[in-house]
Amino acid sequence: MDTSKYLILGGGMVAGYAAKQLVETGLKPRELTIVSGDSSNPYERPPLSKGFLAGKDTETSIFINPDDFYRAHDIEIRLNCVVGNVDSARKSVRLQSGEEIGFEKLVVATGARVRTLDIPGSDLRDVYYLRTLEDSKRIRQKAEDAKRAVVIGGGFIAMEVTSVLAQKGIETTMVLPDDRIWKRFFTAPMSRFFEEYYTARGVRFAKNNKVVKLNGPGAVKAAVLQDGQIAPCDMVVAGIGVKPVTELLAESGIDVADGVVVNEYLETSQSDIYAAGDVASYYDVLFDKHRRAEHWDNAVSQAQHCARILSGERTPFIHVPYFFSDVFDLSYEFWGDSSGADEVVERGDLSSRSFSVWWLRQGKLAAAFTMNRPDEEREAAPQLIESREPVSAGTLPGKQ
């Protein structure tokens, strides 16, 4: 059985950024092995629903490290490998091929997989999900000749895909289960702004609705909605969430609960085994709760932090949750956790392209959203959240 000092399960963003960080902290040749179910070396995921999907980014441009980086540092990447199970006691991983790989320290970075439709017609051609580079390639190719599309979901992936398709001149319908877009995250005025912005650019909304059937034959030709509407389409993209990949840990003794449970040091319940990225349910020191974040910044930050821990720097992961999104010609950012907020403060004009929203909880800033706002607001948001300083509507940055 081959043994590696560091073994990373998953070939996504965590693997790419952890490898880069380990090299910077003195990784020696043949100390790192990456086992990936993907067919490509680690790449950035945000472009898959933004620039790459739109045809603006090339495949080469989205790789985290160039190919020769791994060769130069003698890092072994095993692509198209499926992990069968993890044996924590023996410190080994068994692949479905039967091969075993030993490790001194293991990082579980298996990420998440998309939730799929379970309705009649979901197996028709031209029904897509977006998670991998290959997924994005297939959607991009189909979008070249599609005239009409249905996007299922109302979150950020559905919003980003819809904006790309609409900008390609495709007549796009968004089908969402709530009465407004991204209800779990946006305030009502924020949802109203984005719905009006999308509608003005040709997007149609089917709210308080869901797709109950897809009609063919062979390839999808229409989506049948719960209220009886029929939406003709050449393609369907479902952005209905993801679930963490943890099945391989079933007999490992590692605690799992909506992801791999780790402490503030990204350590699992088994010694020398860590988890990072989309699969990790980590203890958030700032908000005193466990959370699992499915965003670029979390994967990058945890990858870098985990690599430093592997190299001997045992410090807690203290980080303000953050994500960004690009839709049409808009870019926005979000910091923190708005759940449980007892006051919402707005800056700017929510009918314009420049506004910010601030969520307060018990007199402290819990979360902030900014879009085309002054730097003082962008810079203050994470600082105020992390500091836990008392704030009020009057003391927040920006003009009321």
Image (cartoon, rainbow, N blue to C red):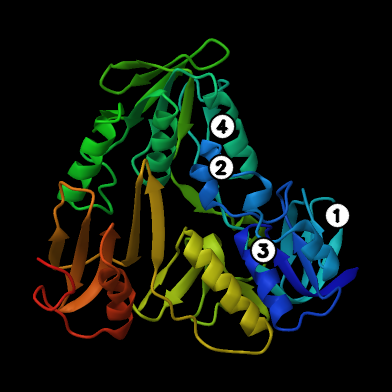
Q: Which residue is mark 2?
A: 52
Check disc 2 and report its element: helix, strand or loop: helix
Binning the other alpha carbons within 10 Å of mark 1 as few (below 14), some (14 to 19) or many (20 upward) gives few
Q: Are the two marked residues, 3 and 2, in contact with CB atoms closer than 8 angstroms? A: no
Q: The disc labelled 3 sits on which kind of residue? A: Gly
Check disc 4 and report its element: helix, strand or loop: helix
Binning the other alpha carbons within 10 Å of mark 2 as few (below 14), some (14 to 19) or many (20 upward) gives many
Point out the residue furthest to the front here: 374
Q: Which residue is mark 4?
A: 140
Task: Find residue 16 and name its label.
Answer: 3
Q: Nearer the viewer, residue 106 or 30?
A: 30
Q: Is residue 369 visible?
A: yes
- Give the mark nearer the N terminus: 3 vs 1: 3
Task: Find residue 208 and name its label.
Answer: none
Q: Are the two marked residues, 4 and 2, in contact with CB atoms closer than 8 angstroms? A: yes
Whether 56 is drawn above or below 98: the answer is above
Query: Label 4 to label 2, Cα distance in Å?
Result: 8 Å
- Give the mark nearer the N terminus: 3 vs 2: 3
Q: Which residue is mark 1?
A: 98
Q: Is residue 268 visible?
A: no
Residue mark closest to the camera, 3 vs 2: 2
Q: Quadrant of residue 78?
A: bottom right
Q: The disc labelled 4 sits on which kind of residue? A: Arg
